[in-house]
Image (cartoon, helix red, strand yellow):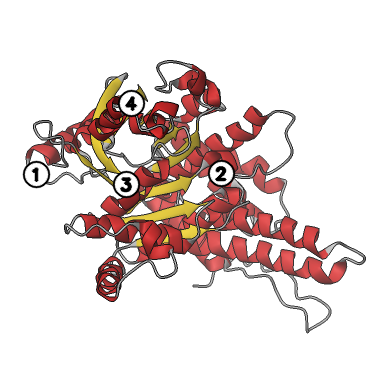
Amino acid sequence: MANILSFEPSRPADRHDRLPPVNTDVEMEVLAALLAAPAEIGRVQAVLKPDYFFEQIHQVTYAAILAIAEADGRPTAGQLYQRLGPAISATAVAADVTVRRYLAELARIGGMTGAPLLTHARVIRDLYLLRHVEAIGAEIGQRQGYDPCAFLDERFERLDELRALRMDRQLTTATLAAAGASLMGQIDADLTGQRRLPATTGLARLDKALGGGLRPATLTTLAARTSMGKSILGCEVALNAARQGLAGLYHSQEMDKDQVMARFASSWLERQGLQISFARMLAPGGLTVEEAGHVAQAVRELSGLSLTIEDGGGRTIREIAAASERLMNAYLRKGLRPGPIVIDHAHIVRPGRSYNREDEGLKEVADGALALAKRLDAPVLLLAQCNRNTESREDKRPSLADLRGAGAFEENSDAVVFLYRPAYYIERSARYRDGDIATQDDYEACKHSLEIIVDKNRAGRSNQVVRAWVDPALNAVRDLDSRSGRPA
């Protein structure tokens, strides 16, 4: 669609130079459509920022529309005229273009455009990103004597920031009337059985304690000492959400993909009554031919789930977030709802820069994990390490005081959950190693016991203890049948 304000950049003297990626017609159509249908401003604002427009006049016009909408709710031509006079005079606009002519052209286009607003807004955003990607590429030939590793690290970081901009942000501001309507809509949907349920952990009692499960856009920190079961429960949560039909991601900083997959397969087989530990799956000569067949069948069944493993240590939270956006976007394009993003674990995520204190680096991780949850509207489960303070106490159950970098995790998390497995300490005692009968009986009585301690909890009561059945060798955590002590 042609318009009287061309504002196309002048063609470079060298005809071989490329023009930047621009579509000024689309920019005009979006502005015109917003004036014609101001109710759409909120949806478009989640995608589009003023500086995404190529033409400065379009930038100031869009900024004026947003400012008027925020103050008065519905921008009019008269209000725009008042705001655009000084703004236009400060831009590089042709002398014969007046504010009146500009607004008249927007009104003309708005009366005839049937433009899909969000689609066009994303075109403007992506053209903006392309211009920046092009600029990054152009820098390669303009630098001499640089360290290629440092140069690439810096450019990849900028590319990750650009990739993050492709995720539409949903605005959360609302009047009380709008918030109330949203709340009642959820309640009505719940009463009629049409409410979208959050991702569940696979443990009914834990879901109830957390207010129904792992809600979208929330951060849950799962902390424990070594060998208490952080990775076991993290794998189980990711696998259970995939069984729900949700898209999930498991970022492993320590285990490689084979180790994580073996845990998934071992838990999957346990549900079918087959006990094949993940350690034997990974050990040379660990399986019989029949057992290998069972594992192969489990792998085939698991392959149909929407769950991706990302392994590799030494990554920053920004790199993890960028990978999460890329992978989750691919699932979203298939029509899948986002499920949990598990990060295993926070204390080996590399800070983006050097800090004087460990807690400063951990705050960067916690802040980034919460931002990721909000950006993708997905629950993030962040595994974390407790310090050694519990080892010197008679009651070795952990609390917030035992969490390394507790302030950052407590501040950012919607829930902080701790794990305690009494059998771990019994089997490492001198009496157990010496074969003491009473100690061995104590171990047998609790070897499958797992306490899940819900400390901080925005969605419900804090200081709750959920008891579950665990088999570490099979990477299995199940609801506990209180009558038999076996998995429910």
Give the amino acid at mark 1.
Answer: Gly
**In the displayed structure, does residue 138 sit left or right of residue 185?**
right
Residue assigned mark 2: 63
**In front of the other: 296 or 275:** 275
Q: Which residue has dot 4 on it?
A: 454
Q: How many residues crowd mark 4 within 10 Å: few (<14), some (14–19), many (20+)?
A: many
Circle nearer the N terminus (1, 2): 2
Residue type, label 2: Ala
Earlier residue among tags 3 and 2 = 2
Give the number of the mark in front: 1 or 3: 3
Amino acid at the residue labelled 4: Val
Tag 4 or tag 2, which sits nearer the N-term? 2
Residue at which label 3 appears: 237
Residue 422: quadrant of the picture: top left
Residue under label 1: 193
Q: Label 3's element? A: helix
Residue type (three-letter) at the residue carrying disc 3: Val
2 vs 4, front mark = 4
SS type, badge 2: helix
Disc 4 on helix, strand or loop? strand
- Name the image quarter holding the C terminus: top left
**Labelled pair 1, 2 in contact (Cβ < 8 Å):** no
Q: CA distance from mark 2 to mark 4?
A: 45 Å
What's the residue at 59%, 55% (across, down)? 52
Check the image and name the residue furthest to the bottom: 16
Q: Find the distance from the CA under tag 1 to the CA under tag 2.
A: 42 Å
Horizontal and vertical percent position of residue 218: 38, 37
Q: Position of residue 81 (x, y in %)?
A: 55, 43
Query: Viewed as shown, does residue 14 lie left or right of 356?
Result: right
Q: Nearer the viewer, mark 3 or mark 2?
A: 3
Mark 1 or mark 3: which comes first in sequence?
A: 1
